[in-house]
Image (spheres, rainbow, N blue to C red):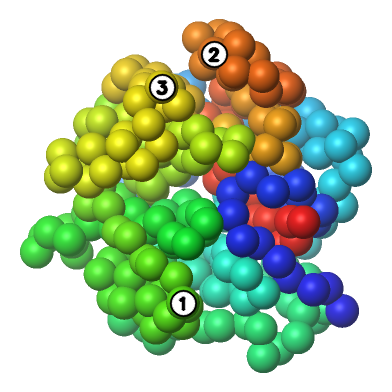
Amino acid sequence: MLRLNVRDETSPLKAVVLGRAESSGPVPKAEDAYDPKSLEHILAGTYPREEDMIREMDAFDAVLKKHGVRVIRPEVLKDCNQIFSRDIAFVIEDKLIKANILPEREKEFEAILHVLDVIDPEKILVPPPAVHVEGGDVMPWKEYIFVGTYRGDDYASYITARTNAAAVAYLQEQFPHKVVKSFDLRKSNTDPRQNALHLDCCFQPIGKDKAILHKNGFLVEEEYRWLLNYFGPENVFEISSEEMYQMFSNVFSISPEVIVSERSFTRLNTWLREKGFTVEEVPYAEIGKQEGLLRCSTLPLVRE
Protein backbone atom coordinates (compact mmCIF):
# COMPACT_ATOMS: atom_id res chain seq x y z
CA MET A 1 0.00 0.00 0.00
CA LEU A 2 1.05 3.57 -0.69
CA ARG A 3 1.05 5.75 2.42
CA LEU A 4 0.03 9.21 1.29
CA ASN A 5 1.69 12.20 2.94
CA VAL A 6 1.58 15.80 1.67
CA ARG A 7 1.66 18.47 4.36
CA ASP A 8 3.02 21.39 2.35
CA GLU A 9 4.22 22.42 -1.11
CA THR A 10 7.96 21.95 -0.72
CA SER A 11 9.01 19.07 1.60
CA PRO A 12 11.26 16.51 -0.15
CA LEU A 13 9.21 14.70 -2.79
CA LYS A 14 9.14 10.89 -2.76
CA ALA A 15 6.32 9.90 -5.16
CA VAL A 16 4.32 11.82 -7.76
CA VAL A 17 1.88 11.24 -10.61
CA LEU A 18 3.22 13.10 -13.65
CA GLY A 19 0.69 13.66 -16.45
CA ARG A 20 1.38 12.52 -19.98
CA ALA A 21 1.16 13.95 -23.49
CA GLU A 22 0.93 10.77 -25.61
CA SER A 23 -2.24 10.53 -27.70
CA SER A 24 -3.36 13.98 -26.58
CA GLY A 25 -5.70 14.23 -29.57
CA PRO A 26 -6.23 16.76 -32.36
CA VAL A 27 -6.09 20.52 -31.87
CA PRO A 28 -9.34 21.41 -30.07
CA LYS A 29 -12.01 23.51 -31.80
CA ALA A 30 -12.17 27.09 -30.52
CA GLU A 31 -15.55 26.48 -28.90
CA ASP A 32 -14.11 23.53 -26.96
CA ALA A 33 -11.23 25.47 -25.33
CA TYR A 34 -11.20 25.30 -21.51
CA ASP A 35 -9.25 28.51 -21.00
CA PRO A 36 -8.41 31.78 -22.83
CA LYS A 37 -4.72 31.02 -23.42
CA SER A 38 -5.46 27.75 -25.21
CA LEU A 39 -8.10 29.62 -27.22
CA GLU A 40 -5.54 32.27 -28.20
CA HIS A 41 -3.15 29.61 -29.56
CA ILE A 42 -5.92 27.62 -31.28
CA LEU A 43 -6.98 30.78 -33.16
CA ALA A 44 -3.37 31.77 -33.96
CA GLY A 45 -2.46 28.31 -35.29
CA THR A 46 0.28 27.99 -32.63
CA TYR A 47 -1.33 25.32 -30.43
CA PRO A 48 1.41 22.91 -29.24
CA ARG A 49 2.22 19.74 -31.16
CA GLU A 50 2.09 16.40 -29.41
CA GLU A 51 5.73 15.49 -30.13
CA ASP A 52 6.93 18.77 -28.59
CA MET A 53 4.83 18.25 -25.46
CA ILE A 54 6.11 14.66 -25.08
CA ARG A 55 9.69 15.95 -25.33
CA GLU A 56 9.03 18.58 -22.65
CA MET A 57 7.40 16.09 -20.27
CA ASP A 58 10.29 13.64 -20.79
CA ALA A 59 12.70 16.39 -19.69
CA PHE A 60 10.64 17.00 -16.53
CA ASP A 61 10.42 13.24 -15.88
CA ALA A 62 14.21 12.95 -16.13
CA VAL A 63 14.79 15.75 -13.59
CA LEU A 64 12.38 14.18 -11.10
CA LYS A 65 14.08 10.78 -11.41
CA LYS A 66 17.52 12.38 -11.13
CA HIS A 67 16.45 13.55 -7.66
CA GLY A 68 15.27 10.05 -6.65
CA VAL A 69 11.54 10.67 -7.02
CA ARG A 70 9.26 7.73 -7.84
CA VAL A 71 7.33 8.87 -10.93
CA ILE A 72 4.00 7.22 -11.77
CA ARG A 73 2.26 7.98 -15.08
CA PRO A 74 -1.46 7.72 -15.92
CA GLU A 75 -2.64 5.05 -18.36
CA VAL A 76 -2.75 6.44 -21.90
CA LEU A 77 -6.26 7.30 -23.05
CA LYS A 78 -6.71 7.62 -26.80
CA ASP A 79 -7.10 11.22 -28.05
CA CYS A 80 -7.24 12.66 -24.54
CA ASN A 81 -5.18 15.51 -23.08
CA GLN A 82 -3.83 14.08 -19.82
CA ILE A 83 -1.03 16.55 -19.13
CA PHE A 84 -2.48 18.34 -16.11
CA SER A 85 -2.79 15.67 -13.43
CA ARG A 86 -3.12 18.35 -10.71
CA ASP A 87 -6.64 19.00 -12.01
CA ILE A 88 -7.98 15.52 -11.36
CA ALA A 89 -7.01 14.94 -7.71
CA PHE A 90 -4.83 16.27 -4.91
CA VAL A 91 -3.43 15.03 -1.61
CA ILE A 92 -3.67 16.77 1.77
CA GLU A 93 -1.97 14.95 4.65
CA ASP A 94 -2.90 11.26 4.16
CA LYS A 95 -6.06 11.82 2.08
CA LEU A 96 -6.51 11.89 -1.69
CA ILE A 97 -9.38 14.13 -2.71
CA LYS A 98 -10.98 13.51 -6.09
CA ALA A 99 -11.42 16.80 -7.90
CA ASN A 100 -14.85 17.68 -9.25
CA ILE A 101 -13.61 18.80 -12.63
CA LEU A 102 -15.21 19.80 -15.89
CA PRO A 103 -17.45 16.85 -16.86
CA GLU A 104 -15.61 16.41 -20.18
CA ARG A 105 -12.47 15.52 -18.22
CA GLU A 106 -13.93 12.86 -15.93
CA LYS A 107 -12.24 10.02 -17.82
CA GLU A 108 -8.81 11.41 -16.90
CA PHE A 109 -9.42 10.26 -13.32
CA GLU A 110 -10.06 6.72 -14.55
CA ALA A 111 -6.53 6.69 -15.98
CA ILE A 112 -5.05 6.69 -12.45
CA LEU A 113 -7.10 3.79 -11.09
CA HIS A 114 -3.86 1.77 -10.80
CA VAL A 115 -2.71 4.40 -8.28
CA LEU A 116 -5.98 4.31 -6.34
CA ASP A 117 -5.70 0.51 -6.12
CA VAL A 118 -2.66 0.81 -3.81
CA ILE A 119 -4.23 3.48 -1.54
CA ASP A 120 -6.40 2.63 1.47
CA PRO A 121 -9.98 3.25 0.18
CA GLU A 122 -10.82 5.03 3.43
CA LYS A 123 -8.18 7.62 2.55
CA ILE A 124 -9.91 8.55 -0.74
CA LEU A 125 -12.45 11.38 -0.46
CA VAL A 126 -15.07 12.04 -3.13
CA PRO A 127 -16.72 15.45 -2.57
CA PRO A 128 -20.46 15.83 -3.29
CA PRO A 129 -21.43 17.17 -6.75
CA ALA A 130 -22.09 20.71 -5.45
CA VAL A 131 -18.44 21.00 -4.41
CA HIS A 132 -16.35 22.21 -7.38
CA VAL A 133 -12.62 21.93 -6.73
CA GLU A 134 -9.38 21.43 -8.68
CA GLY A 135 -5.90 20.80 -7.30
CA GLY A 136 -4.38 23.92 -8.82
CA ASP A 137 -6.44 25.94 -6.35
CA VAL A 138 -5.42 24.01 -3.22
CA MET A 139 -2.14 24.42 -1.29
CA PRO A 140 -1.45 22.96 2.17
CA TRP A 141 1.07 25.18 3.96
CA LYS A 142 1.94 24.82 7.66
CA GLU A 143 -1.22 25.49 9.69
CA TYR A 144 -3.10 26.67 6.59
CA ILE A 145 -4.77 25.26 3.51
CA PHE A 146 -4.70 28.08 0.95
CA VAL A 147 -7.57 27.85 -1.55
CA GLY A 148 -8.21 29.88 -4.70
CA THR A 149 -11.88 30.42 -5.48
CA TYR A 150 -14.31 32.72 -7.26
CA ARG A 151 -17.10 34.17 -5.12
CA GLY A 152 -18.99 36.13 -7.78
CA ASP A 153 -22.71 35.53 -8.37
CA ASP A 154 -21.81 34.96 -12.04
CA TYR A 155 -19.62 31.92 -11.17
CA ALA A 156 -21.54 29.69 -13.60
CA SER A 157 -20.77 31.96 -16.55
CA TYR A 158 -17.00 31.43 -16.22
CA ILE A 159 -15.48 28.22 -17.58
CA THR A 160 -12.34 29.53 -15.85
CA ALA A 161 -14.00 29.47 -12.38
CA ARG A 162 -12.96 26.05 -11.13
CA THR A 163 -13.28 26.07 -7.32
CA ASN A 164 -16.37 27.37 -5.54
CA ALA A 165 -17.27 28.51 -2.01
CA ALA A 166 -18.77 25.07 -1.28
CA ALA A 167 -15.28 23.60 -1.76
CA VAL A 168 -13.82 25.97 0.82
CA ALA A 169 -16.46 24.83 3.34
CA TYR A 170 -15.92 21.17 2.42
CA LEU A 171 -12.16 21.35 3.00
CA GLN A 172 -12.68 23.06 6.35
CA GLU A 173 -15.03 20.22 7.31
CA GLN A 174 -12.55 17.52 6.29
CA PHE A 175 -9.55 19.21 7.94
CA PRO A 176 -10.99 20.96 11.01
CA HIS A 177 -7.53 21.31 12.61
CA LYS A 178 -6.37 23.52 9.70
CA VAL A 179 -7.19 27.12 8.85
CA VAL A 180 -8.69 27.09 5.34
CA LYS A 181 -7.92 30.53 3.90
CA SER A 182 -9.56 31.39 0.59
CA PHE A 183 -8.58 33.96 -2.04
CA ASP A 184 -10.99 35.46 -4.58
CA LEU A 185 -9.30 35.20 -7.99
CA ARG A 186 -9.68 37.30 -11.13
CA LYS A 187 -11.38 35.36 -13.93
CA SER A 188 -11.73 35.95 -17.66
CA ASN A 189 -12.99 33.60 -20.36
CA THR A 190 -11.32 35.66 -23.08
CA ASP A 191 -8.17 37.46 -21.81
CA PRO A 192 -5.37 35.19 -20.50
CA ARG A 193 -3.54 38.18 -18.98
CA GLN A 194 -6.58 38.93 -16.80
CA ASN A 195 -7.29 35.34 -15.80
CA ALA A 196 -5.93 33.46 -12.79
CA LEU A 197 -7.19 30.03 -13.80
CA HIS A 198 -6.05 28.57 -10.47
CA LEU A 199 -4.34 29.92 -7.36
CA ASP A 200 -1.02 28.52 -8.61
CA CYS A 201 -1.32 30.80 -11.66
CA CYS A 202 -0.74 33.86 -9.45
CA PHE A 203 0.87 32.54 -6.25
CA GLN A 204 3.03 29.71 -4.96
CA PRO A 205 5.00 29.18 -1.75
CA ILE A 206 8.62 28.06 -2.28
CA GLY A 207 11.46 27.01 0.00
CA LYS A 208 10.59 27.32 3.68
CA ASP A 209 9.41 30.93 3.84
CA LYS A 210 9.28 32.46 0.35
CA ALA A 211 6.69 32.92 -2.38
CA ILE A 212 6.01 33.98 -5.96
CA LEU A 213 3.08 36.40 -6.20
CA HIS A 214 1.08 38.39 -8.77
CA LYS A 215 -1.06 41.20 -7.35
CA ASN A 216 -3.56 41.48 -10.20
CA GLY A 217 -4.52 37.80 -9.89
CA PHE A 218 -6.44 38.70 -6.74
CA LEU A 219 -9.79 40.51 -6.78
CA VAL A 220 -9.50 41.63 -3.16
CA GLU A 221 -6.39 43.70 -2.45
CA GLU A 222 -6.48 42.85 1.29
CA GLU A 223 -6.13 39.16 0.44
CA TYR A 224 -3.07 39.83 -1.74
CA ARG A 225 -1.65 42.06 1.05
CA TRP A 226 -2.21 39.30 3.60
CA LEU A 227 0.03 36.96 1.57
CA LEU A 228 2.64 39.68 1.04
CA ASN A 229 2.79 40.35 4.78
CA TYR A 230 2.65 36.68 5.75
CA PHE A 231 5.78 35.86 3.73
CA GLY A 232 7.33 39.35 4.05
CA PRO A 233 8.04 41.58 1.02
CA GLU A 234 11.75 40.69 1.16
CA ASN A 235 10.84 37.00 0.63
CA VAL A 236 8.36 37.55 -2.20
CA PHE A 237 9.15 37.55 -5.94
CA GLU A 238 6.49 39.76 -7.54
CA ILE A 239 5.63 38.95 -11.15
CA SER A 240 4.11 41.15 -13.85
CA SER A 241 0.96 40.35 -15.83
CA GLU A 242 3.16 39.23 -18.74
CA GLU A 243 5.10 36.93 -16.40
CA MET A 244 1.85 35.56 -14.99
CA TYR A 245 0.73 34.92 -18.58
CA GLN A 246 4.00 32.99 -19.12
CA MET A 247 3.19 31.03 -15.90
CA PHE A 248 6.18 32.18 -13.79
CA SER A 249 4.37 31.18 -10.57
CA ASN A 250 3.76 27.63 -11.79
CA VAL A 251 7.20 26.19 -11.01
CA PHE A 252 7.50 22.97 -9.00
CA SER A 253 9.37 22.20 -5.77
CA ILE A 254 11.16 18.86 -5.48
CA SER A 255 12.38 19.97 -2.03
CA PRO A 256 12.83 23.21 -0.06
CA GLU A 257 16.15 23.65 -1.89
CA VAL A 258 15.37 22.38 -5.43
CA ILE A 259 12.93 24.00 -7.83
CA VAL A 260 12.07 22.96 -11.39
CA SER A 261 11.49 26.01 -13.60
CA GLU A 262 11.01 26.84 -17.27
CA ARG A 263 14.37 27.61 -18.86
CA SER A 264 13.23 30.95 -20.32
CA PHE A 265 12.24 32.42 -16.90
CA THR A 266 15.56 34.27 -16.65
CA ARG A 267 14.50 36.95 -14.16
CA LEU A 268 12.90 34.43 -11.80
CA ASN A 269 15.64 31.80 -12.12
CA THR A 270 18.33 34.39 -11.38
CA TRP A 271 16.46 35.54 -8.24
CA LEU A 272 15.98 31.96 -7.08
CA ARG A 273 19.69 31.21 -7.41
CA GLU A 274 20.55 34.43 -5.57
CA LYS A 275 18.32 33.19 -2.74
CA GLY A 276 20.25 29.91 -2.59
CA PHE A 277 17.94 27.59 -4.53
CA THR A 278 19.12 24.94 -6.96
CA VAL A 279 17.16 25.61 -10.16
CA GLU A 280 16.59 22.74 -12.58
CA GLU A 281 15.68 24.36 -15.90
CA VAL A 282 13.53 22.45 -18.39
CA PRO A 283 11.85 23.39 -21.69
CA TYR A 284 8.12 23.71 -20.99
CA ALA A 285 6.94 26.66 -23.09
CA GLU A 286 4.85 24.58 -25.49
CA ILE A 287 2.85 23.03 -22.64
CA GLY A 288 2.55 26.54 -21.18
CA LYS A 289 0.41 27.52 -24.18
CA GLN A 290 -2.45 25.62 -22.49
CA GLU A 291 -2.43 27.88 -19.40
CA GLY A 292 -0.69 25.31 -17.23
CA LEU A 293 2.91 24.55 -16.42
CA LEU A 294 5.04 22.45 -14.08
CA ARG A 295 2.95 22.39 -10.88
CA CYS A 296 -0.18 21.74 -12.98
CA SER A 297 1.43 18.62 -14.47
CA THR A 298 2.07 16.95 -11.12
CA LEU A 299 0.00 15.19 -8.47
CA PRO A 300 2.33 14.72 -5.46
CA LEU A 301 1.45 11.61 -3.43
CA VAL A 302 4.24 11.40 -0.88
CA ARG A 303 6.52 14.08 0.57
CA GLU A 304 8.79 13.56 3.57
Secondary structure under tag 2 reads: helix
Residue under the image location 38 percent in, 48 percent down: 198
Identify the disc placed on residue 234.
3
Left or right of residue 155, residue 124 in this image = right
Examine the rendering and report whether any part of residue 72 can be seen. Answer: yes
Q: Position of residue 28 (x, y in %)?
A: 46, 43
Q: Nearer the viewer, residue 229 or 271?
A: 229
Q: Is residue 170 above or below residue 66?
A: below
Q: Nearer the viewer, mark 2 or mark 3?
A: 3
Q: Quadrant of residue 1?
A: bottom right
Which residue is the site of mark 2? 271
Q: Nearer the viewer, residue 267 or 255?
A: 255
Q: Position of residue 256 (x, y in %)?
A: 68, 38
Secondary structure under tag 1 reads: loop
Q: Residue furthest bottom?
A: 122
Residue under the image location 69 percent in, 48 percent down: 11
Left or right of residue 249, residue 6 in this image = right
Residue under the image location 79 percent in, 29 percent down: 59
Q: Amino acid at mark 2?
A: Trp
Q: Amino acid at mark 1?
A: His
Q: Quadrant of the C terminus?
A: bottom right
Asked whether the beta carbons under mark 2 and mark 3 sit within 8 Å of each other, the answer is: no
Q: Earlier in the sequence, mark 2 or mark 1?
A: 1
Secondary structure under tag 3 reads: helix
Identify the disc placed on residue 177.
1
Q: CA distance from mark 2 to mark 1?
A: 35 Å
Q: Position of residue 293 (x, y in %)?
A: 55, 35
Q: Nearer the viewer, mark 2 or mark 1?
A: 1
